[in-house]
Amino acid sequence: MKEKKVYVCEACDYQSPKWMGQCPSCKKWNTFVEETYQPVSVAKNQRTSVISDMSEPVLFGEMEMPKYIRVKTGTSELDRVLGGGIVKGSVVLLAGEPGIGKSTLLMQICSQLSERVLYVSGEESKGQLKLRGERLEINGEGVYFLTETNVDSVLNHAEKLKPEIVIIDSIQTMFDPNCTSIPGSINQVKECAVKLIAKAKSQGISIILVGHVNKEGIVAGPKILEHMVDAVLYFEGERIQSY
């Protein structure tokens, strides 16, 4: 079967066979981008591999309460907006403009967590991460750094390391090799998020996804991504001030 090209609204994920100036679903203008979708049979096989990793159904009476359901980040303000810390098995989207300090904040958190952390960077090299870590005086105990953009490779490393927390910096740089769209596209971001969320829910791993914000002030990629995660945090700052 041939690849199918459709136009997808970045704001609401509405699909159309042709480009339109205004989305008929959310009524926003100039939000359609071209996406390439693979045959249904291939996509079905992909979904099967993701669903098979999920846990089996359990009766409510047989479910166990985690001993430590929340993990303190060491940053009181972040713990406050998270309701007391990072919930085990939750997926948090940390969004903000490029360069506003998302990576710096997360690296500071890594040095304060007592749990095993896997920090995945798709934007910086190990040398850049090392320089930033030394500048922030991070000891790095229990923190593993991985420079990777292949989501399947990330999941394989997570399976070996068994971390309690995984940080993806950023979700726009991740790609699924089974998806034909280019990295950063709506389809790629959504497919990678589905696999990461399945991993979090099936194995109780807390995942933090870094998401860049475009010039319109919304998370780059599908708007549906904000509804797929457990919490969305927006990192904002004043353009005309130091903080």
Image (spheres, helix red, strand yellow):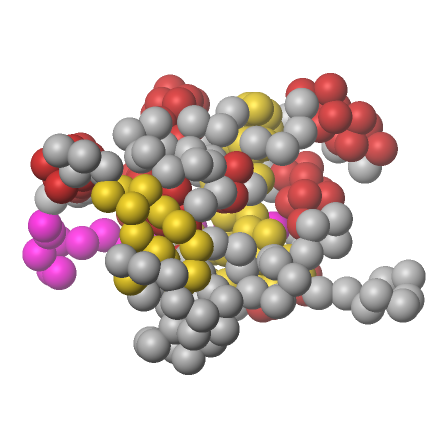
User: Image check: 178 left or right of 124?
Assistant: left
Main SS of residues in magenta:
loop
Residue 229: percent from the left, percent from the top? 39, 58
Residue at 38 percent of width and 61 percent of height: 19
- Can you tell which quarter of the image residue 79 is in? bottom right
Residue at 60 percent of width and 52 percent of height: 212
User: Image check: 195 left or right of 34?
Assistant: left
Whether 69 is drawn above or below 142: the answer is below
Q: Is residue 196 visible?
A: no
User: Image check: 130 left or right of 52?
Assistant: right
Whether 180 is drawn above or below 94: the answer is above
For the N terminus, give its image quadrant: top left
Q: Which residues are magenta?
A: 57-73
Residue at 74 percent of width and 54 percent of height: 100
Residue 50: percent from the left, percent from the top? 21, 38
Residue at 49 percent of width and 73 percent of height: 29
Frontmost residue, 72 versus 95: 95
Residue 96: percent from the left, percent from the top? 64, 58
Q: Is residue 100 visible?
A: yes
For the C terminus, give its image quadrant: bottom right
Frontmost residue, 9 versus 224: 9
